[in-house]
Image (cartoon, coloured by chain):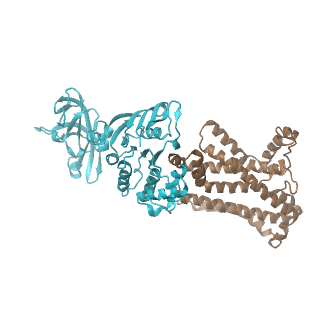
Amino acid sequence: MSAVTVSARVAARGLDAQLKVSEGRVLALVGPNGAGKSSILQLVGGQLRPDAGTVTIGDEVVSGPGVHVPVHRRRIAVLEQRSLLFEHLSVLDNVAFGLRARGVPSDEASQRALTELEAVGCGALADSRAWEVSGGQAQRIAIARALATDPRLVLLDEPLAALDVSVAPAIRSLLRARVRDEGRTALLVTHDAVDALALADALAVVEDGRVVDVGPVADLLSRPRTPFVADLVGVNLLAGVASEVDTVTLPTGERVVGVADGPLGRRRDAIASFAPAAVAVHTVEPSGSPRNHLRATVTGIEPRGSLVRLTADLADGSPVAADLTLAASVDEGLVPGRDVWLVVKAAQVALYPR
Amino acid sequence: MSLPRWLLLPAGLAVAFVALPLLGLLVRVPFADVPTLLSSRSSLDALGLSLLTCLIATAISLLIGLPLALVLARSDGRLAGVVRTLVTIPMVLPPVVAGLALLITFGRRGVLGAPLSVLGIEVGFTTIAVVMAQVFVAMPFLITSVEGAVRASGSGYEGAAATLGASPTHALRRVTIPLLAPSIASGAALTFARALGEFGATITFAGSLQGTTRTLPLEIYMLRELDTDSALALSLVLIVVAGLTVAVTGWFSRRTVRRGIS
């Protein structure tokens, strides 16, 4: 298994990506739609050729000035949303396909394919036609097929996105066992914080074709620094400037008091984050309270399970979400356009440098 | 679906318009004499020649038309658009014009025919000319139907094959072609049927020499008044082949749909 480095530009896609995956590690790429996550995967996979820069796998330059190793010679495995099993072949022949393409004799390829199928719990399906299996089974077989050739790198492009919620967890733990626990090097594109936590060691946030933040998954998810990651983990994020050891002043001039787990440099950019469940909504200004209260205008309200998710904009347009009970939202007469005060206890606000 | 009921009237007329001539012809076919009529020397010559030339024309269409269909399906440039239009033209061109074009180009005094003639190669009025006329008018059916199928199936499977280590040639042989087999088969059946019915281009470019260029449709045309019974018997053969072609293509397209869903 090999380390991967990407330092490449693709003008047509507005991509200028720099990233590195250490050997045996899994890097998750997250970011808004169209940010360039899949393009980065295609650069590594060989489906996309950079205008400038290089892509290396191990110590081999696979894309660079005057060099472009074609997809089929990169010794990689790709798993995407669609399992893309070859419908004219049996399940076993699907898994043996990569070995046969590399010239492994038929008997040996079938034997190894069967071992791979058993490793994903689909040994009994070996003789089935590819179009006879269910969606979850198809993705298990696709995993077996991808790993059968012992690739030096695994590219996972939202491998769970098309699966039924009832089967996704099982496939997620299978991927964790077969990719992360076996120490394979991998790149994972995902829209799901759970996938990132379960499958990846490190997280890279991609926005507008650039890697804007990278670090251990748990660190990045527990202290989101970009609106996208805050959204991903479902917390509110307000950016401002540290004015005291425990206070961040927002662009609106309002102050948010919270708990900092490290020193906040005075006058340095800082972030306040808090969960939507920690936000209370008042229609009259709360008085004599040491708690944070922020002026906002309701922009939307929609049911979410047994709760109601209220969204409101601060004076500078920063969005804040609050989870209320249905009764609370009705009693207070909360409708879009209504001016409200958002109240958050200081103990429930995390402060950290930007 | 709720359509106005009066639509059934014009719809019924359309069915009648297509069905009546076929029924009319079938009513007149002297079924008892068909075996005798079909075993006459000239009928057998025409049947044999049609079978031979159509098989060769279909094979040539597969050999060069299939690669063109694959290339066109993966190209989006201006040139591809021009080529796509070009290969569709024979489908809408009057066959007699197609025959004239072939004659003017490959005939004894034609643009390419004259130099070929100097080399001792005569194309016009030979069985080769019959095959050329058939390929010219029938190959577009294979190209357009296969290109459509390749576009509809997308390039995902080839991409997957490549990541598994398959070279482009390996992916074509082991993935693309097998997955397309139903479309290729139905395209080939359409091509064969169109070649079998070819008349205008053949008579213009290849003439009507018994055993050399007189295919089934030409034989039927010649016999239609001289020996109506023989013409009807031969027509029956063509109707049966046409019916089989429709059945075969229909079966293959249903097969594709079923696999596509699952």
Residue extending farthest left: A288
Q: What shade has chain A been given? A: cyan
Q: Position of residue B245 (x, y in %)?
A: 69, 60
- The residue at the point 36 percent across, 58 percent down is A166
Question: Which quarter of the image is occupied by the N terminus of chain A?
Answer: top left
Q: Nearer the viewer, residue A157 or A288?
A: A157
Above or below residue A129? Residue A178 is above
Above or below residue A160? Residue A8 is above
- The residue at the point 48 percent across, 31 percent down is A11
Decide if residue B131 is on the left or right side of residue B186.
right
Chain the render paints brown:
B
Could one spot residue A130 in this view of the protein?
no
Q: Position of residue A275 (x, y in %)?
A: 23, 43
- The residue at the point 35 percent across, 51 percent down is A176
Residue extending farthest right: B226
Residue A5: quadrant of the picture: top left
Question: Which quarter of the image is occupied by the C terminus of chain A?
Answer: top left
Decide if residue B22 is on the left or right side of residue A132.
right
Above or below residue A303? Residue B2 is below
Could one spot residue B11 in this view of the protein?
yes
Q: Position of residue A71 (x, y in %)?
A: 51, 42
Q: Nearer the viewer, residue B258 or A28?
A: A28
- The residue at the point 63 percent across, 43 percent down is B72
Q: Nearer the viewer, residue B61 or A202?
A: A202
Decide if residue A293 is on the left or right side of residue A9.
left
Residue extending farthest bottom: B32
Residue A56: quadrant of the picture: top left
Decide if residue A178 is on the left or right side of residue B240.
left
